[in-house]
Each structure stands twice: as C-alpha cells, then as structure tokens.
Image (spheres, rainbow, N blue to C red):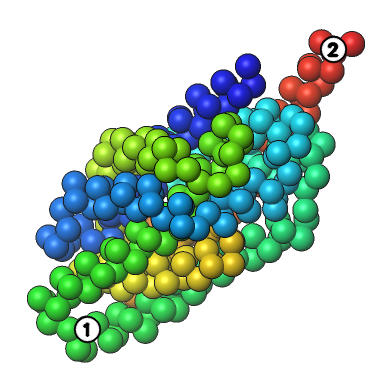
C-alpha cells in the first residue's frame, strides 16, 4: 500500500516539477526565435530519458546520501518528504514567491528522514547546501564574463547559434542534475537502484506534460521580472548556469537549475549596470529560497513524527 501511494505521489511530483522548472529552462531564450517552445520541450524530454541512463549520481545522492531511504519505512518517509516539498512550494507560489522545488525536496527529505528515524548524514546535508549556495554565485560570475564577450564579438546571427549551444548545455545539465530529483522518488517507489529506460521515459513524459502546462506563467516570471533583458543576457545565463550545474552533477551534488539561471541573469545584468536588475524581484526570490528549505524540513519532520506515532499506536 505504501508503494502504491508513493507511485501516485511520484507521478504528481514529476508533473509539478515540469510546471515549476520547465518554463524556467525555456524562459531565458524566449526573446530569440531560434528554438520554438515545442522544440525546446521535446529536447528536454529526450534528454530526461537518456542522460540519467548514462549518469544518475545525483538521484543516488537524494536517495542515500541525505538519508537512507532504502531502509525499512523509507517509502513512507519519501512520500512524506515529497508531500511536504509540494505543499511548501504551493504555499509560496500562492503568495507570489516563486521558489526552487529542489531546495524544497532537499529540506523535505532531511526533515522526513529525521522524523522517521532514518540514518541522516549531517555532513552530506551541509555539503549539498554549500553547493546549493555556490551554484547561483558561480552562474552569476560566469555570466558576468560571458555577456561581455558575447556583446563585443557576436553578431545577431552568431547569437542565435550561441543560444542553440546554451540551451543544449542547460538542458543536459538539468537532466544530469536537478531533474534527477524525480527519478529518485521513482527509485524508491519501484525499488530499483539504476536508471532503466522505461522509468526514465515515464519520468520524462510526466515532466513534459507539466512543462507544457506551466510554460506561459513560469517563463514570464523568470524571463521578464528579474532583469530588463536583451537576448544576449538570456544566452549568457543559459551557458553559465549549464556549466555550473554540470560541474555539480559531476560530483553528485544536487543543485537548482532555476537558482543557477537566476544567478546568471543577475550576473549578466550587473555587468551592464546594476540598474538593469529589478532588485525587488531578486530580493523576493532569494527570500523565498531562504524560507523554502527550513519550512519543508520542519513540515517533513512534523508529518513523519505524526504518521509514525499513529502507525505505532495502530500496531500496539
């Protein structure tokens, strides 16, 4: 019964991830006609199918390094973690504060693991948090350099080619890192430890459906509210975020692509003067990030303690 509930929750989580993340991945390049949204979604889905078959280190980190969800009761704790993260993201979205679903699931997994009594590694949690902070800073720094190079040396036609390369790098990075949070939930639900093609295909299809549904709103939020952007800003942010997130994936550290993109956009904007950045929107986004992880951790812990208490009462 626990596995069935987790399978349903895993499917919902993949759809919501598409709604929350997919638009952000496409938003930075919407001012360029190089890649149509439908083509972008198709590329994302295909990479979500294939890249985890090659490398799924980040999914393993979600499942084993934060807390041991293969232990008895792990499926229930994972269900609680996902529900907690979705609840926090939904609450913040309703308040007009877009946030990172990856941060939410890291918090939910940690809190639910502690509340359920699973082995939790404080060192791994702190390491993941350190990489989470570093990713947008690195993305911003790289974009600060790239925007200068692009504006000095690239024609309009050349920028289209850089956009194609940037979108591909960014999409590979998402499939190798941030996107594997969905695969991690399915790994516990179905009891596998690798990344079989049928399961990555299922995750990718559900993610694609969510992306198609959420693209208009998510794209508008990140692509237009954060900075007064030109096409070159989006291209620089894509390339910078992709490189930063791929580097994190290489060592199995989950980070948020939306955070890295936001950092890239801000870095590209600052390179041409801080007035281009809408700082009120940036502060609102950062405040939501700071709230997301502790809120989801606290909710996950409380729900895990409550559910485990009721389960113990039923057995006694």
Image coordinates for residue 32, horizontal then vertical, percent = 15, 63
Mark 1 sits on what residue? 151
Count every numbered label the image shows and give the total.
2
Q: Residue at x 46, y 67 (%)?
A: 246
Q: Quadrant of residue 94?
A: top left
Seen from the viewer's position, the closer of residues 311 and 98 is 311
Image coordinates for residue 85, horizontal then vertical, percent = 57, 38
Q: Residue at x 45, y 38 (%)?
A: 199
Q: Is residue 305 left or right of residue 96?
A: right
Quick one: label 2 or label 1, which is nearer the N terminus?
1
Seen from the viewer's position, the closer of residues 166 and 89 is 166
Q: Residues within 10 Å of mark 1 (few under 14, many from 20)?
A: some
Q: Is residue 292 left or right of residue 46?
A: right
Q: Residue at x 68, y 63 (%)?
A: 127
Spot the residue most to the left: 157
As drawn, the label of residue 315 is 2
Image coordinates for residue 209, horizontal then vertical, percent = 31, 35
Seen from the viewer's position, the closer of residues 104 and 172 is 172
Image coordinates for residue 271, horizontal then vertical, percent = 35, 81
Q: Quadrant of residue 237?
A: bottom left
Q: Is residue 166 left or right of residue 72?
A: left
Q: Quadrant of residue 1?
A: top right
What is the distance, in whole Å, between disc 2 and disc 1 at their CAs? 67 Å
């Amino acid at each position: 019964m626990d596995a069935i509930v987790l399978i349903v929750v895993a499917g919902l989580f993949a759809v919501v991830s598409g709604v929350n993340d997919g638009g952000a991945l496409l938003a930075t390049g919407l001012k360029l006609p190089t890649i149509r949204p439908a083509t972008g979604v198709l590329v994302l889905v295909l990479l979500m199918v294939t890249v985890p078959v090659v490398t799924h280190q980040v999914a393993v980190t979600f499942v084993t390094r934060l807390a041991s969800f293969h232990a008895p009761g792990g499926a229930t704790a994972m269900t609680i973690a996902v529900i907690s993260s979705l609840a926090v993201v939904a609450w913040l979205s309703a308040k007009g504060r877009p946030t990172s679903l990856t941060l939410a699931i890291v918090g939910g997994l940690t809190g639910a693991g502690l509340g359920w009594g699973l082995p939790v590694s404080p060192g791994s949690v702190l390491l993941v948090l350190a990489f989470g902070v570093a990713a947008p800073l690195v993305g911003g720094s790289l974009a600060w350099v790239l925007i200068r190079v692009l504006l000095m040396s690239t024609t309009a036609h050349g920028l289209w080619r850089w956009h194609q390369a940037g979108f591909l790098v960014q999409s590979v990075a998402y499939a190798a890192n941030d996107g594997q949070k969905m695969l991690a939930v399915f790994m516990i639900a179905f009891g596998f430890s690798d990344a079989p093609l049928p399961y990555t295909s299922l995750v990718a299809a559900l993610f694609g459906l969510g992306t198609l549904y959420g693209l208009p709103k998510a794209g508008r939020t990140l692509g237009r509210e954060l900075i007064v952007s030109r096409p070159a800003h989006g291209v620089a942010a894509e390339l910078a975020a992709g490189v930063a997130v791929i580097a994190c994936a290489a060592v199995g550290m989950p980070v948020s692509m939306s955070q890295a993109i936001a950092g890239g956009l801000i870095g590209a904007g600052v390179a041409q003067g801080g007035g281009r950045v809408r700082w009120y929107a940036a502060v609102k986004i950062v405040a939501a990030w700071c709230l997301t992880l502790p809120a989801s951790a606290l909710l996950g812990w409380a729900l895990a303690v409550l559910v485990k208490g009721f389960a113990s009462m039923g057995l006694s």
